Image: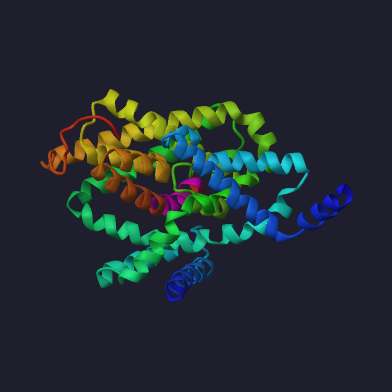
């Protein structure tokens, strides 16, 4: 468990060092994630124990957003001033993104002639 | 007794223990309500916890910096947790390898739509530059969206709340949107939810269909990577 956390921290640290060295606008942990993903691809997976620690940490992922989210209290005036633009952008853009992604995916799947693969024929729901 | 209570409060309000404890209590309270409401996406536990904590800080006159002294121990774990996202990403990648070319094209189209349409709509309605930058990564999973927001000059905490609201909107509107468009392929349905509404949408997709859930989780991970790489370049072109 401790060694698994250490591995995650080492990857994060490596990501941070790379981001600073090459002055990338990418968050260090994201580079760490990409490095770990590459390692997993190269090694064909991780030991069971490591997977368990990683997935255990992710089980409470949403808790980790709370402290930063509370910081919104410092921007309440900004939200009060721009709430119309923000709500319209969030609702409009989210629906548009769902539509574009689904339509492009369906189009590509049809073009590649595998339209029915993995399809559950129960219809709507997700 | 009352002078003692005041003394205790003065002491507690300066220790990190209080900020850390109320964060965990608020989150577990939010989770309890969410479960009681049969996982209704509108009652998102993170949103409930944030509203409860903001109200608490407001009524006790505590400033955010004091609260964060304690909450930073939770916040710190975001980094290692982001790295750990590689594990489910790898597991899903193996499952969906066959559809990969289609996934990649749909992902890039969705990723660009998410950022550009949000910026476009908010800009047309007069939002400020900092708001636009904070809004751009709204479809990306929270820890990475906050990192992108910080790296590109936005307000990470504003981004965090916009991301959570996006997830809730996606979870609420996805079924309706996809049914109107007549999308029946679970792969396309899952991918669309994962790109648009990250983890909150993915949780919703997993409740409905396993294939949709796998595609949604993969889409969430890949969209985070794609946005982290492409958005700074895109913002550089726009601003």
Viewer can see residue B201: yes
Residue at image location 31% in from the left, 51% down from the top: B218
Q: Position of residue A35 (x, y in %)?
A: 38, 67
Viewer can see residue B154: no
Residue at image location 48% in from the left, 70% down from the top: A9
Q: Position of residue B27 (x, y in %)?
A: 55, 47
Front residue (pair B120, A2): A2
For residue A113, side relative to residue B41 (left or right):
left
**Against A94, is A18 above or below?**
below
Q: Position of residue B101 (x, y in %)?
A: 21, 49
Residue at image location 27% in from the left, 71% down from the top: A42
Q: Residue furthest bottom?
A: A3
Front residue (pair B43, B36): B36
Q: Main secondary structure of the magenta part?
A: helix
For residue B79, side relative to residue B90 (left or right):
right
For residue B128, side relative to residue B113 (left or right):
right
Front residue (pair A44, B66): B66
Magenta region, residue range? B226-235
The magenta stretch spans residue B229? yes
């Amino acid at each position: 468990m401790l060694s698994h956390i250490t591995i995650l921290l080492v990857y994060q640290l490596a990501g941070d060092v790379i981001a600073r060295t090459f002055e990338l606008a990418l968050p260090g942990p994201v580079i760490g994630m990409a490095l770990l993903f590459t390692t997993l691809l190269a090694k064909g997976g991780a030991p069971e124990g490591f997977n368990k620690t990683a997935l255990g940490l992710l089980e409470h992922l949403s808790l980790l957003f709370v402290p930063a989210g509370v910081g919104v209290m410092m921007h309440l005036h900004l939200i009060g001033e721009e709430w119309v633009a923000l709500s319209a952008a969030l609702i409009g853009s989210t629906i548009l993104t769902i539509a574009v992604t689904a339509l492009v995916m369906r189009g590509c799947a049809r073009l590649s002639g595998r339209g029915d693969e993995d399809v559950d024929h129960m219809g709507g729901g997700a | 007794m009352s002078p003692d209570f005041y003394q205790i409060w003065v002491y507690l309000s300066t220790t990190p223990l209080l900020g850390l404890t109320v964060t965990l209590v608020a989150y577990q309270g939010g989770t309890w309500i969410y479960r009681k409401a049969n996982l209704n996406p509108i009652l998102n536990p993170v949103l409930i916890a944030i509203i409860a904590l903001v109200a608490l800080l407001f009524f006790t006159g505590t400033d955010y910096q004091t609260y964060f002294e304690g909450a930073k121990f939770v916040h710190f774990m975001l980094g290692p947790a982001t790295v750990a996202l590689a594990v489910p990403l790898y597991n899903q990648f193996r499952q969906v390898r066959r559809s990969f070319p289609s996934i990649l094209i749909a992902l890039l189209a969705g990723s660009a739509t998410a950022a550009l349409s949000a910026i476009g709509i908010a800009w047309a309605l007069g939002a400020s530059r900092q708001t636009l930058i904070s809004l751009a990564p709204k479809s990306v999973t929270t820890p990475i969206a906050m990192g992108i927001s910080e790296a590109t000059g936005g307000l990470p905490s504003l981004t965090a709340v916009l991301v959570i609201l996006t997830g809730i909107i996606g979870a609420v509107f996805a079924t309706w949107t996809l049914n109107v468009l007549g999308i029946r392929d679970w792969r396309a349905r899952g991918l669309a939810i994962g790109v648009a509404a990250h983890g909150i949408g993915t949780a919703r997709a997993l409740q409905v269909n396993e294939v949709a859930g796998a595609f949604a989780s993969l889409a969430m991970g890949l969209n985070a990577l794609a946005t982290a790489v492409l958005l700074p370049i895109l913002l550089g072109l726009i601003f």
